[in-house]
Image (cartoon, helix red, strand yellow):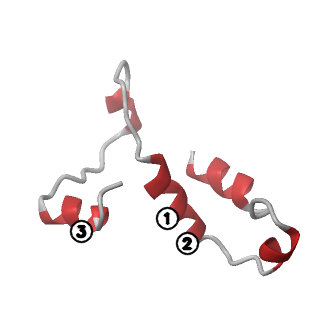
């Protein structure tokens, strides 16, 4: 993972917003670790996760919302 990835891409203006249809017939690589960390930081904190172990209960819903 690139440290300060968001700063790196913003500084070089590498982030673009376009229609999803532009990706048709395209192979796309996603930095999974960065994406999951960002998703977990933005989701509501679940205090029982540490006590119960495992993944946060709302993680599945958060991933489905993103996709």
Left or right of 42? Residue 19 is left
Residue under numbered circle 3: 7
Q: Secondary structure at mark 2?
A: helix
What is the CA distance from the residue labelled 1 to the residue labelled 2? 5 Å
What is the CA distance from the residue labelled 3 to the residue labelled 1? 14 Å
Q: Earlier in the sequence, mark 3 or mark 1?
A: 3
What x and y, as percent, mark residue 57? 80, 62
Q: Secondary structure at mark 1?
A: helix
Quadrant assignment for the N terminus: bottom left
Would you say the residues marked 3 and 1 are in contact, meaning their CB atoms lie under 8 Å apart? no
Of residues 43 and 48, the one drawn nearer to the viewer in this rendering: 48
Residue at 63% x, 51% y is 63
What x and y, as percent, mark residue 34? 44, 57
Residue at 32% x, 31% y is 22
Quadrant assignment for the C terminus: top right
Residue at 30% x, 57% y is 2
Left or right of 51? Residue 17 is left
Q: Which mark, residue 38?
A: 1
Above or below, 51 relative to 54: below
What x and y, as percent, mark residue 18? 30, 44
Are there few (<14), some (14-19), or many (20+) residues within 10 Å of tag 3? few
Q: Residue furthest bottom?
A: 47
Q: Which mark, residue 41?
A: 2
């Amino acid at each position: 993972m690139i440290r300060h990835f968001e700063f790196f891409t913003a500084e070089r203006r590498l982030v673009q917003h376009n229609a999803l249809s532009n990706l048709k017939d395209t192979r796309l690589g996603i930095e999974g670790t960065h994406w999951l960390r960002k998703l977990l930081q933005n989701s509501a904190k679940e205090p029982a996760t540490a006590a119960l172990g495992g993944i946060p209960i709302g993680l599945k819903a958060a991933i489905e919302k993103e996709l």
